[in-house]
């Protein structure tokens, strides 16, 4: 009788120890996802796409709010678009990314960018929600990109196409707000 009692006590102690033990016992403190808890490898391509989208959103898809235009001062726009911004806009218009190495690739070489301001004007003051009284300053740029394009096809018949004189035009708008106090006094220019 004492042996069976000892076995029962030992069994209860082992089961209590297994229930409270950390590790892969099968019982978790939260929601158990079952087979969905197994990590699935993700291609670096998708991670690069997410990082590129965040980069564009953080740098180029926001409208800055700057101080008021001084009375009698020039209402000139902020900096012209950077080369990176022009190439990102060209990539959205005519993508090159996503080629398969040794099967199909496209390259842009000898890139030259010419930026021309085609318009620079300021709207009259108005009330903008979440900002207050402000003026919208528009600056429109025509960016001409000269480059040589190389297309490499590796299968079924390998060949390379070289286009030495490619010209692409990208239009970029730089808009930003100027804060404004009294629309009839502070924003006159």
Image (cartoon, rainbow, N blue to C red):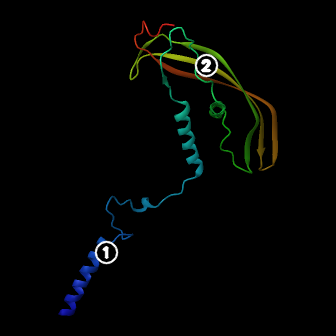
- Say which quarter of the image contains residue 36: bottom left
CB of mark 2 within 8 Å of CB of mark 1? no
| Left or right of residue 64: residue 89 | right
Q: Residue at x 39, y 21 (%)?
A: 129
Q: Is residue 45 above or below residue 129?
A: below
Q: Could you give the CA–CA distance between mark 2 and mark 1, rounded to whole angstroms?
A: 69 Å
**Callout 1: few (<14), some (14-19), or many (20+) C-alpha neighbours within 10 Å?**
some
- Which of discs 2 and 1 lies nearer the camera? The answer is 2
Q: Residue at x 69, y 45 (%)?
A: 99
Q: Is residue 48 above or below residue 127?
A: below
Q: Residue at x 35, y 60 (%)?
A: 32
Q: Which residue is mark 2?
A: 140
- Say which quarter of the image contains residue 151: top right
Q: Position of residue 173 (x, y in %)?
A: 59, 22
Q: Position of residue 58 (x, y in %)?
A: 52, 35
SS of the residue under disc 1: helix
Q: Is residue 51 above or below residue 138?
A: below
Q: Position of residue 9 (x, y in %)?
A: 22, 84
Disc number at residue 18?
1
SS of the residue under disc 2: strand
Q: Position of residue 38 (x, y in %)?
A: 46, 61
**Callout 2: few (<14), some (14-19), or many (20+) C-alpha neighbours within 10 Å?**
some
- Nearer to the camera, 39 or 86: 86
């Amino acid at each position: 009788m004492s042996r069976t009692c000892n076995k029962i006590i030992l069994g209860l102690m082992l089961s209590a120890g297994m229930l409270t033990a950390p590790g892969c016992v099968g019982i978790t403190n939260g929601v158990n996802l079952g087979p969905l808890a197994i990590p699935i490898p993700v291609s670096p391509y998708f991670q690069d796409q997410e990082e590129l989208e965040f980069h564009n959103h953080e740098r180029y898809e926001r409208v800055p709010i700057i101080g008021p235009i001084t009375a009698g001062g020039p209402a000139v726009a902020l900096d012209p678009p950077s080369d990176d911004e022009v190439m990102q806009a060209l990539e959205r218009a005519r993508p090159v990314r996503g080629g398969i190495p040794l099967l199909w690739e496209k390259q842009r070489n000898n890139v030259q960018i010419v930026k021309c301001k085609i318009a620079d004007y300021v709207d009259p003051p108005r009330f903008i929600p979440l900002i207050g009284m402000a003026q919208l300053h528009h600056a429109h740029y025509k960016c001409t990109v000269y480059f040589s394009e190389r297309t490499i096809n590796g299968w079924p018949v390998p060949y390379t196409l070289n286009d030495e004189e490619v010209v692409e035009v990208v239009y970029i708008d730089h808009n930003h707000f100027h804060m404004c106090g009294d629309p009839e006094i502070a924003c006159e220019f």
